[in-house]
Image (cartoon, helix red, strand yellow):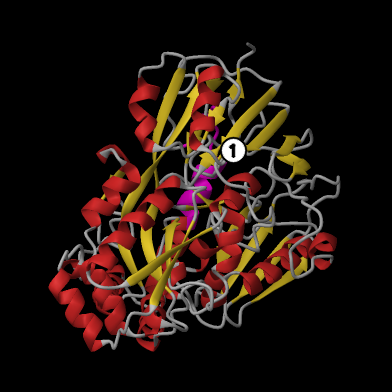
Amino acid sequence: MKMKKWSFIISLCVLVSMLAACSSGDNTPAAGSGDAGAGKAAATGGEMRVAMSAQPPTLDPHMTTVTATRDTARTIYETLVTLNSKYQVTPMLAEKIDASADGKTYTFQLRKGVKFHNGKEMTADDVVASMNRWKEKSSRAQKILNGATFEAKDPGTVVLQLKAPSLEVLFTLATPTQFPAIMPKEVVEGADTKGVKEYIGTGPFKFVEWKQDQYIHVAKFADYQPLAAASDGLSGKKQALVDDLYFDIVTDGSTRLAGIQTGQYDIVLSLPTDNYEQLKSNSSVVSQVALSNTFNAVFNKKQGLFAKTELRQAVNAALDIDKIMVASFSEKEFYRESSSYLFNEQADWYSEAGKDKYNQKNADKAKSLLAAGGYNGEEVRILTTRDYDFYYNASVVMKEQLEKVGMKVKLDIYDWPTLTSRREDPSKWDILIAGLTPVTTPSQLLYMTPTWAGWTTDEKIASTLKSIDASATKEDAKKLWDGLQAYAWETLPIIKMGDYYALNATTKQVAGFGSFEGPVLWNTSVAKK
């Protein structure tokens, strides 16, 4: 049968990952870790303070794709499966995964004795309740798991039944953003439209307090049971090496910089990149450059000006992406120009299809397309924030470039939580600057879905993504993806501007800090000062 080849590939990937997860080894920093604390024995206890640039809208990871939620909530919650540093699917709360020969049934044997932070032991009922809620909230899950069911076979076994085989199902379950966190059944059932009312997971840290606009406090979970395998990406052994972990909300970049230099903070995230040379010259601070996200201009295609393809093409023709990226990230170490929707490192999916439409810098073409699209001086609203300086800087340069070809442009500037709320309303914006986390397969691209901000309803995009998921071979899938990326560069659900690297920093007292799809704060310690 056509799908047996993919079923074999998926099963083999899971088998290899399970073998790795069952191996023994010492705790090691996560992939992408810097030199923080290199060569020092890990200290334990005390507190660690992490300064982050934006406050999350919620700590319920089912509810949002916002990275501030991802970065904080991953310390509290865990998932059935996760990703290692090679983007391979690896069991986490699942102990074993079996796939049926036809690729439609996945059976997850759960780890025994795993406790929630409220002392209750995790069972299949909790997993089923969590997964069913998540697949209703996540646009990625809605696409891949449409019509799928999760059922509890017994207290230690969960069965996922698919309507059709899927290349992407396990990768979707392992997604680090808007991830399928496992929560107690009663917490899931008590949730309302704003999210859960209690933050209870199985992770190495438990929720203590959220003081709005000041800090989020989590503490070591004494009953946490780590895996034996070495830490790798988001997989393997996790240990809370500090008693208390504080996420300090510090929206001003200069304040975060001053705080790491004085030792007020142990770790700072997302520093302005023009601080890099200053950090390198400070012997008490260790800087870390970590591949972070793709950098995009997202069009509101549901209503307004950019429901017209010609006007989206006009914007794309007008942009000088070189200048936008320099203004956003200052130093070449912190960005790369790339037309590929997926990362260069992802050999199975990296594509140069449509590259001729990238970074055109063609004002005459832009003006011609504006005329063809019937543009008549209407105001273009770019939704942006100063909480992430590179979003704001990109918006300023984009505004200047669009005004040069005759467009009337306004910047709508909000704090990050307000922006994430407003982007859900198609009457509130036209263009959104967005850094989006990398994905493992094309179908996980949020901006290719009809439910995420931007509202892509193109039938060719939807049908081709389904064909990719059902492909018989990697080669077939890649050929389809090349064609779809070329089509996307013609129709422009977004403009992919490039990829960027985050500048993080730690004091010399920090050991074990690393990054993989965001900061990895388990296995991280602070030496007594």
In the foreground, 513 or 430: 430
Query: Are there few (<14), some (14-19), or many (20+) residues within 10 Å of tag 1?
Result: many
Which residue position is annotated with label 1? 250
Q: Is residue 275 above or below residue 301?
A: above
User: Residue 282 at x, y = what percent?
Assistant: 41, 16
Secondary structure found at label 1: loop
Horizontal side, residue 124 vs residue 346: left or right: right
Q: Is residue 426 above or below residue 385?
A: below
Q: Is residue 7 visible?
A: no
- Report if residue 182 lies within the magenta region: no
In the foreground, 305 or 322: 305
The N terminus lies in quadrant = bottom left
In the foreground, 414 or 226: 414
User: Residue 249 at x, y = what percent?
Assistant: 63, 40
Q: Is residue 356 visible?
A: yes
Horizontal side, residue 353 vs residue 14: left or right: left
Residue at the (70%, 50%) spot, across then down: 111
Residue at the (85%, 49%) spot, across then down: 120
The quadrant holding residue 183 is bottom right
Which stretch did the figure color magenta?
14-30
Residue at the (43%, 79%) spot, across then down: 456
- Report if residue 28 lies within the magenta region: yes
Q: Is residue 170 above or below residue 308?
A: above
The C terminus lies in quadrant = top right
In the foreground, 232 or 278: 278
User: Residue 335 at x, y = what percent?
Assistant: 30, 45
Q: Amino acid at mark 1?
A: Val
User: Residue 182 at x, y = what percent?
Assistant: 70, 57
